[in-house]
Amino acid sequence: MFSVSLNLLLGYTGLFSFGHAMFFGAGGYGTALALKHVSGLALLPAVGAGVLASLVLALVLAPIVVRVSGTAFAMLHLAFSQVLYVLALKLRAITGGEDGIGNFPIPPLNIPGVASLPMKDSPQNFYYFAIVLLALSLWLMWFFTKTPFGQVQLAIRENAKRTDYLGFKVPQSKAVIYLVSAAFAGVSGSLYGLFHNLVSADGAFGALVSFAPIINIMIGGIGSFMGPILGTALFQVIEEVTSRFTERVELVIGLIFVFVIMFAPLGVLGTAKMLKQKWLAGRTARDVVQRAA
């Protein structure tokens, strides 16, 4: 979910962010703080608190970042993300500092008139809760890309000046896309915090947290909706297999990332699509030659 939310910016709108972890972390900390300080808070409102924290952060930053693009956009987000990382470490009374916020209460999922499903001591219930929330979020993001506004995303990516000339307000359109991306990043951060029952500065705002979805998108295929999903699956498999043989998992993943950038910049799906097009073009050419003969 986190990778797909970044892909709404990177793959569909052409906005490269090095600091998307700040929305992931805001979602995690928002949910953890709400559950810690608001007694009797239900599960879904707690997730909503995390999404609200991400949206508020996006609303504060949007007037600044939507007016830039390219390197400026990427570096601004890297700077803002590092500011939040330092604040999470320094504001120990609120965030718990390096220790983070852990062991906060996780309420059951109450379905009025049906059942009350415990979450904290029932991994199976939490698994299905997370799967449903994941599927719903992915469907909503996919639907967003298929709306007319999704076509505006692609237009901004291809040529922002021409899109503005056609009458679409590019900064305002970027702001809407930015808010949607931040909201779903907040959902993923909230779920991550609930799963571990811990939210920390390194696990929420760290640089590696921002780089992970970029790697997933590049490996799977930038510009396609399924690319980040496939890339995340491959990333997890590579990480799991590599960890059985060496502790230098980051080194192996880094080398694979370099290999992808050098030899398969379109990712797995993009490379497969290109090879398919070449094969179809070659077959068409052979058919033409045979007919001519």
Image (cartoon, rainbow, N blue to C red):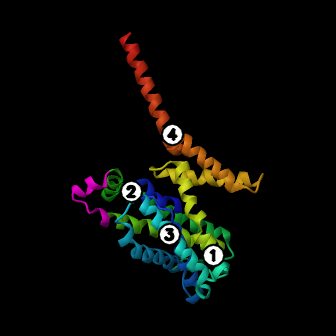
Separation of disc 1 and disc 3 at Cα? Answer: 19 Å
Front in this rendered view, residue 239 or 62: 62
Q: Which label was assigned to residue 271? A: 4
User: Residue most toward the right?
Assistant: 245
Q: Secondary structure at mark 3?
A: helix
Q: Position of residue 116 (x, y in %)?
A: 59, 79
| Residue that badge 3 annotates | 79
For residue 254, side relative to residue 60 (left or right) = right
Q: Earlier in the sequence, mark 2 or mark 1?
A: 2
Question: At 55% from the left edge and 63% from the top edge, which residue is drawn?
Answer: 210
Q: Secondary structure at mark 4?
A: helix
The three-letter amino acid code for the residue at tag 2 is Thr
Q: Which label was assigned to residue 265? A: none
Separation of disc 2 and disc 1 at Cα? Answer: 30 Å
Q: Earlier in the sequence, mark 2 or mark 4?
A: 2
How busy is the neighbourhood of tag 1: few (under 14 within 10 Å), some, or many (20 plus)?
Answer: many
Separation of disc 3 and disc 2 at Cα? Answer: 21 Å
Q: Quadrant of the C terminus?
A: top left
| Residue that badge 1 annotates | 200
User: Residue most toward the top?
Assistant: 293
Q: Is residue 177 above or below residue 237?
A: below
Q: Are marks 1 and 3 in contact (CB under 8 Å)?
A: no
Q: Secondary structure at mark 2?
A: helix
Q: Is residue 179 above or below residue 104?
A: above
Q: Earlier in the sequence, mark 4 or mark 3?
A: 3
Q: Are marks 1 and 4 in contact (CB under 8 Å)?
A: no
Q: Secondary structure at mark 1?
A: loop
Judge depth for marks 4 and 3 and give the one in front: 3
The three-letter amino acid code for the residue at tag 3 is Ala
